[in-house]
Amino acid sequence: MKGSRSGTAGVKRADVVIAAAVLLTALGLIAARLFAPGAVYAVVTVDGAEAARVRLDSASGVIYEDGHVTVVSENGAVRVADSDCPDKTCVRTGRLSRAGDRAVCVPNRTVVELTGGEDRIVTY
């Protein structure tokens, strides 16, 4: 039979359209996963107990103050603004803005840690 293509693996226009649709869908899902704005929280822990938890994108001003340490949130970041510890390492740590960032005041047993935002982490 002349002209019969049974058993031949020819690429048809419909195959290309389906492959392109699958590829675009996969790329869209990957992009949505990479750029999804996961909520980041500032967690203040004193003596191992949680003393404060605020969402960074909605907090502004003093978020924790106990007479020894003052923690301030501003412009999507958090920082230890003041501490009565002798070396002020926690104050010099500066602004924390990404999940996993941490400032520790050992003399006052205070930890400020940013958690959440896991939607932005991609592992292979």
Image (cartoon, rainbow, N blue to C red):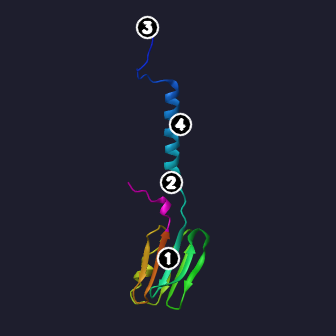
Label 4: how many residues lie within 10 Å, few (<14), some (14-19) or many (20+)? few
The residue identified by callout 2 is 33
Q: Element at badge 1?
A: strand
Q: Is residue 118 above or below residue 85?
A: above
Mark on residue 79? Answer: 1
Determine the residue located farthest toward the front in the rendered image. Answer: 1
The tag earlier along the polypeptide, 3 or 4, is: 3
Q: Position of residue 8 (x, y in %)?
A: 40, 20
- Return the mark for residue 21: 4
Q: Type of residue at label 4?
A: Ala
In front: mark 4 or mark 1?
4
Sequence-wise first label, 2 or 4: 4
Type of amino acid under label 3: Lys
Query: Is residue 83 among the parts visible in the rendering?
Result: yes
Q: Which residue is mark 3?
A: 2
Work out whether mark 1 precedes mark 3 in sequence or the reverse, and give the earlier one. Answer: 3
Residue 28, x across and y down, in percent: 53, 46
For residue 40, side relative to residue 86 (left or right): right
Dot 3 or dot 2, earlier in sequence: 3
Q: Nearer the viewer, residue 104 or 74?
A: 104
Which of the two discs, 2 and 4, sits closer to the camera?
A: 4
Amino acid found under the numbered disc labelled 1: Arg
Q: Quadrant of the C terminus?
A: bottom left
